Image: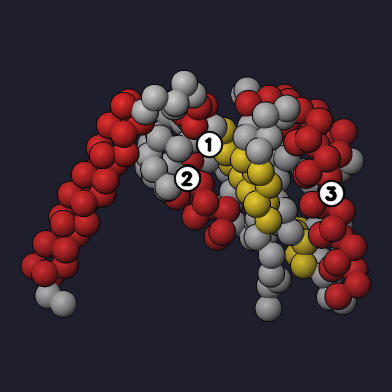
Amino acid sequence: MSAIEQSKTHRLDKILYNVRRDIHLRSLEQSPFPYKHYHLMAHALIYGASGISGWSLLNQTRIYPTPTTFSRITGTTSRPFSLEKAQIPQDERIKIASGIDLTKSADQVAAALKEKVEDISTVTHVFFTGTASLTSMSPSAHISAAYIQEDDFETLKQTNTRLLENAVRAIEQIAPNLKSIILQTGGKG
């Protein structure tokens, strides 16, 4: 495909996207359902936002399934991270909360979330993923915001089950409007 054809295709995609968004917004305004704007209050929390999958979720929740699905989007990381470093387009809905260490107890994770995430009690959707490298507890381990690679399967399973349990128990304590937790599974090869 030539550069001119790619440019035309890109412009057409953008036009179609805007038309779909406008139709969706108009249908919401005309809806007789009394809570038609409920989804505008949805708050996504992404554990592991500095990794490949977490970064993609942070970027996509801005626009998918619609640009108005989430009124707040919070990415968490265990290490310092910023939207500028992530190269995510400027969006006032997106915030980063660094220093969320899932190797701590659920109570400690909940306290860190309360301290670092504005309106944590409004979280409705949680995405659990992560692939950002850090030095870990043992020389053989590879840690991320929501995943630690271990050399043997049993240790890998125990370690990462504990991270998931801490994350889920923490958010359940402090987010009474929680609707869903999405878990991306898999490992690093």
Q: Earlier in the sequence, mark 2 or mark 1?
A: 2
Q: Disc 1 marks which residue?
A: 73
**Badge 2 vs badge 1, beta-carbon distance below 8 Å:** yes
| Left or right of 78 on screen, residue 88 | left
Q: Is residue 120 visible?
A: no
Which residue is more in the foreground, 153 or 19? 19
Closer to the chain start, of discs 1 and 3, is 1
Along the line of sight, the residue nearer the viewer: 16 or 57: 16
Q: Quadrant of residue 24?
A: top left
Q: Which amino acid does the dot numbered 2 rest on?
A: Thr
Give the residue drawn at x 40%, y 35%.
68
Q: For the C terminus, give its image quadrant.
A: bottom right
Q: Say which residue label 2 marks.
A: 61
Q: Residues within 10 Å of mark 3 (few under 14, many from 20)?
A: few
Q: CA distance from mark 1 to mark 3?
A: 22 Å
Q: Amino acid at mark 1?
A: Ile
Residue 66 falls in image quadrant: top left
